[in-house]
Amino acid sequence: SVPKVSKICCIGAGYVGGPTCAVIALKCPHIQVTIVDLNQARIDAWNSSDFNLPIYEPGLEDVVRATRGRNLFFSTDVDGAIRAADLIFVSVNTPTKKTGIGAGYAADLNYVEKATRRIAQIATSSKIVVEKSTVPCRTAESMRVILEANSKPDARFDILSNPEFLAEGTAISDLVSPDRVLIGSLQTHEGKEACKALSEIYANWVPQERILTVGLWSSELSKLAANAMLAQRISSINALSAICEATGANIDEVAHAIGKDTRIGPKFLKASVGFGGSCFQKDILNLVYLSESLHLPEVAAYWRQVVEMNEYQKRRFTRHVVDTLFKTITGKRIAVLGFAFKADTGDTRESAAITIIKHFMEEKALVTIYDPQVEHEQIWMDLQEVSPTFTLQQIKRQVQIAPCALDACAEAEAVVIATEWKEFITLDWEAIYEQMSKPAFIFDGRLLVDSAKLAKIGFKVSSIGRGAEVTA
Ligand code: UDX
Ligand code: UDX
Ligand code: ADP
């Protein structure tokens, strides 16, 4: 019979586990959901009385306000939550390995393994264990082996793969009305029953035809494939943006024309300074590593090129800034608007802004950063990590963080738009222009602002994927 789920535990209170399980709690008032994490500060923030949550996500606070203390709980008591749960989501981090075998490519599964071992050690009754973190193919199999080798006599485990497709900045609406929910299970009787139990949870708000049930390996591979194909679209449009700049074609016009083909579709064709985020690069590199492990070097090379094009786009952008500023930016002040990897998030993981600023620092420019959501501490941490040869003191000699966009741009020679925050569209650009050195340059890395209007004010505008005609 299908196992009954009345208590859920989620291990990992991060960008994935937090919003996902908060929405489950919202939509399933009959289920008690406990989100646990080893990080006390993170749990404290989730529990804070003023709802100063550890991640910024539109709509998230409302969901937590409606559910926290009702059927949603945050705790550091990992063991207690494991013991009580019928179903456990594993939503721990899986960063790219920095050292050892597969360094720079393979996922670091240390956290997944530790969480899995903990489940085996603690559980005294049967559990459904759901892999939620993005993981390389066959991780579920490793989890199964670990769980079975360490389980207590009365505890049996069913493993499911249920990758999360939410995008940051739109997490709540993605979770409330997902394109699809994907559940992978072993095709055994028990596997299918466990799959049914998880489907029933989602069925509380997701239409049945959007709940797809597949094999474990298909599920794991689909997550990597979806992200790789999305990233590939961006690298494709960015490759075309280079041709546009060289020819005078306009990438927005090209993207619009391409996207009208229903086989291609209009979404995810925005040229940019490069994609970031915790998923795209990591998942593609996972796919490259997997392909190589399977002795498929041509497949590996194909996907690797998507990441290489992204690196090229960031380099190409900074080179264009330097070239335009009369081939030197030494000692020049450059305002960087936006530091998050996309709008509506405070997340900076793999943000293109980090790489761009690193290049500016190497060219000895003075950089002033403004971002409406990113914590200052995070900016310093990211810049230090990307430039290990600089001390924090050296970085702070070249880089400042401003409290608003207007301040960031004061006396700058150039403004670089690195994140597509809406508020940048409606800045008082005339006031900014007044305060800048002349000629005043704008480099729009997000095709965000109205270049004709800014050119009229007097700016020299360069936009990704546009020839020089508006710079006049
Ligand atoms: C992505 C996937 O969209 C999501 O389904 C998956 O679960 C996790 O990875 P996320 O990284 O949060 O989500 O954001 P996404 O909106 O996909 O953007 C990724 C990067 O691509 C951002 O840096 C964004 O600015 C950039 N991007 C996106 C473009 O440059 N152009 C586009 O047209 C779309
Ligand atoms: C293509 C474009 O579709 C059309 O818009 C353009 O004007 C001319 O080029 P065509 O070459 O006639 O049209 O056929 P199309 O249906 O695109 O198929 C091209 C090839 O791709 C065929 O060999 C087809 O079998 C193959 N294909 C197509 C796949 O292998 N898989 C698919 O999912 C789709
Ligand atoms: P993601 O974007 O995948 O959600 P995050 O890094 O935001 O990644 O969140 C993962 C969370 O998992 C972190 O807060 C981390 O402290 C937590 N975590 C990692 N390992 C364990 C573990 N064994 N037990 C509990 N929490 C863990």
Image: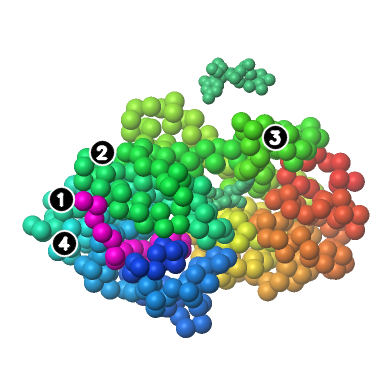
Q: Which residue is mark 4?
A: 125
Q: Residue at x 70, y 37 (%)?
A: 255
Could you say which quadrant of the image residue 467 lies in? top right
Residue 329 in the figure: left or right of residue 358: right
Tell me how far mark 4 sits from mark 2, CA to CA: 22 Å
Closer to the camera in the image, 382 or 212:
212
Amino acid type for the residue under numbered disc 3: Lys
* Residue annotated with mark 3: 260
Disc 4 residue type (three-letter) = Ser
Q: CA distance from mark 1 to mark 3?
A: 51 Å
Tell me if residue 21 comes above or below residue 42 in the rendering.
Answer: above
Give the x, y percent position of residue 185: 29, 43
Which residue is at the front of the view, 281 or 44?
44
Q: Which of pointers 1 and 3 lies earlier in the amino acid sequence?
A: 1
Does the segment drawn in magenta span residue 442?
Answer: no
Residue located farthest toward the bottom when viewing the structure as drawn: 49
Q: Is residue 251 something one can see in this rendering?
A: no
Q: Which badge, 1 or 4, comes first in the chain's sequence?
A: 4
Residue assigned mark 2: 187
Above-or-below relation of 452 to 66: above
